[in-house]
Image: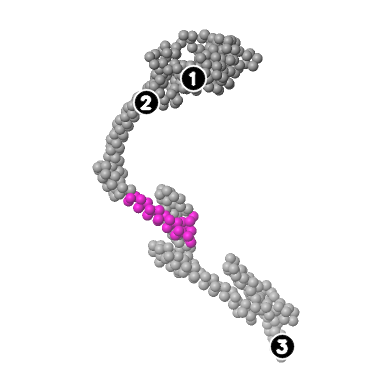
Amino acid sequence: MAMFNKVMNVLVFVLSICAVIFGFFLFEKRDELRNRGDKMAKAINTVSATLDRNSNTEFAKRLVAGKLELDPEKDPAATTNQKISLYHDNYKNLDTVLRPFQDQANSIMAQRDLLGITLNNVMITLEVPQADNYAAINFQHVDRYEDTRTELLGVVKKVNDRDNALVRQIADSARVIGFTLDTDSLKSLDDFSSPLETFGGKVSALKTRSDTYASHIRKVCSVLEVSTPSLDGSDYADALSTALNGVQNVKDEFEATKIDLRNTKQKLAETETRLNQEIEKVAKLEVEVDKLKKEIAILKGDEGGEGGFEELGRDFLVNKLEGSVLKVNKKWDFVVIDLGREAEKNVMIRGTKENPKPVTVALPEGRVMDIARGNRFLGQIKITRVNDRCAIGDIIADSKQGDIEPGDRVFFARALKTGEDAEAPGDDGAAEAAPAAAPAAAPAEDDDNGFGDDW
């Protein structure tokens, strides 16, 4: 019995030692499991946060890897903590806690699949050759999507390069046509049709204009009887050159004809000018002849001629009046002359020696007369008062060139004719202009003024 007790004690001791050893190992496994659970909780929380990044979601906030209070008596939020805690003491609620993570994974997978389908539809819409190579599953397979993405980007770049080349070519063509087209408007996804319609309209107008030019060029060539060019082929430049040479030849002939015509017109104009000058000379001579005829008629006493004595004769005879200074008043600068209304020197003879006709020519007031002594000019007077036998004239101070004495001759200035435009003798304008111009030379004592012995 004693031996049995000893054996049992030894056995209990051994079992105790084993229990201690197994307890130690179990405790270590427990800690290992707890650590692994904590790591898994942290990993799940990290993955959820990673999936939340740039996804506009907050699933990671529904998962907490650390320990939370689960006793309602200690924390009023215990019920909420049971739904979000990944800690090992909340194992019984793990399905509920992990459900948001599962929803997040499902959303990401749905998004992935939708992106694959969308990318495939994009390739089909862009009419990319062999679009089936970019099926949705190629973007879903983890081991294939990177290569598919690279190929997709390459194709998209080619499409973009093609579109940019088309835009540049259209813009360059627009500049060639003669207007500016904004490349940004051609790249617009919403309003590209408007500039394209403008470009199409310009091209259509250019084609219409080109056809019209071709039609008119053919008509011009037909009218000018030169070779009609063919403008439909690629050799239109040579055809236009041939037509241009033909037109140039016609133009040269036309210019030569114009020069001949211009020379002829110039010669005709010169002839007409000379003719008009001769006609003008003849007309002036005819006027002079008529005037001389009238003067001759007046001098002959032929009052039946055109105009008669009253029209031309009396003014003509007034300018022939000559007299002498009777008195000089140096204080008041006036003179008295022996001309008047009825003075002896106012009586003039007209007509012929066989038929003399005495005429009394009254001296008019307001006229300007010259005073001279021999051929020396002394000054001018203005007739201010006319009596029957004498007249009074104020000396014009600016004209005075010497002392005036009784006996000095008084006469009307008569301009000598030096050309076709010279004033005729007896012209009042010549008498009035005498003070400002060089004074006319006084007539000589024996000057008969070219009218014969009758004067």
Residue located beneath label 1 in the image? 361
Q: Nearer the viewer, mark 2 or mark 1?
A: 1
Most common SS among magenta residues: helix
Q: What residue type is labelled 2?
A: Ala
Image location (x, y in percent) of residue 220: 29, 45
Q: Are marks 2 and 1 in contact (CB under 8 Å)?
A: no
Q: Which of 143 and 272 is in front in this view?
A: 272
Q: What residue type is labelled 1?
A: Val
> Nearer the observer, disc 3 or disc 2?
2
Nearest the camera: 106 or 224?
224
The Cα–Cα distance between marks 1 and 3, rounded to whole angstroms, is 205 Å
Residue 141 makes an appearance in the image: no
Query: Residue 313: where, in percent of width, then height?
Result: 44, 22
Is residue 40 or residue 391 the one in the foreground?
391
Residue plotted at (30% across, 49% down): 215
Residue with the mark numbered 2: 283
Numbered disc 3: secondary structure: helix
Spatial separation of the CA atoms under disc 3 and disc 2? 186 Å
Quadrant in which the C terminus is drawn: top left
Label 2 and label 1: CA atoms lie apart by: 32 Å
Residue furthest to the right: 74
| Residue 452, quarter of the rendered image | top left
Measured from the top left, where is residue 172 in percent x and y?
43, 50
Tell me the residue at 29%/40% (across/down): 247
Q: Which residue corresponds to the image point at 62% horizontal and 77% vertical from the top-left?
A: 97
Which residue range is magenta in the image?
184-212
